[in-house]
Image (cartoon, rainbow, N blue to C red):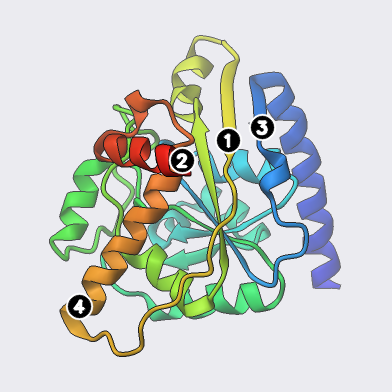
Amino acid sequence: MRLIVIYSLRITLLVIGRLICLVLFRVTVEGREHIPLQPERLMLIANHFSWFDPPVLALALPITPAFVVATEAHERRWVSVLLRLFDTIPIWRGQVDRAAFRLAAEAMQQGKVVGIFPEGGINPDLAERRARGETVAHLQGNMSRANPQLIPARAGAALLATMTEAQILPVGVLGTEQIMTNLRRFRRTRIIIRIGPAFGPIAADPSLRGQARRRWLDEQVDQMMRRIATLLPPAHRGPYHELGQEHRRSS
């Protein structure tokens, strides 16, 4: 009975959410043909310029990913209610959260698409603190990125990809960082979602250990970000500007 109620609520919220999207946003989705029809395991990766990225992607795409979401997001009651209604996977940022990786792997085994943001967060300042090993326990004014450019990614997305041997679907999202500003001005927001060709799976050399394995994972997540970079205009590619250009020439 509980599952029926949850499923009914999900369907209702999806319908309401899509109606709200029609009113508030002008969403264009490009590259639908790149979505694999029947993948054994599929992981969606995307840039993360705004808190609105997961709901917009879930409402606009023909697939509904189970997004890996920061555990601290569940601490806000109004956010937690929505997250619990959908298949979100909580993760502690700033550390290797093996429990979250296990849940993501189980979700893929059940045929679900798992969505992850390799940059690890919206606010670059918090990203720097996490890179120093600090666990950020609260949301601190990171509804949208003030300067909508890519930031260096963390190796977690590459680690999950190698653990699950999943195909990887790159997605670029533009416009979500303007939603709050436009809402205050009663303006519709133009959002563009670009889907790139799926790639992978990627497999690690089992002989790699320690720093060598870490360097290899860093290289793989850079490759992932290059795929996302090619889906964004040069002004939004940040440190992946030249990398995006090189990947475009080689593809």
Q: Which residue is mark 1?
A: 194
Q: Which residue is mark 4?
A: 212
* Cα separation between marks 4 and 1: 34 Å
Q: Secondary structure at mark 4?
A: helix
Along the line of sight, which residue is nearer the eye, 187 or 162? 162
Q: Which mark is residue 51?
A: 2
Of the residues under marks 4 and 1, which one precedes in the sequence? 1
Of the residues under marks 4 and 2, which one precedes in the sequence? 2
Q: Quadrant of the N terminus?
A: bottom right
Q: Is residue 86 visible?
A: yes
* Cα separation between marks 2 and 1: 18 Å
Q: Check disc 3 and give the amino acid type.
A: Val
Q: Check disc 1 and give the amino acid type.
A: Arg
* Cα separation between marks 3 and 2: 19 Å
Outermost residue on the left side: it is 132
Q: Is residue 144 above or below residue 96?
A: above
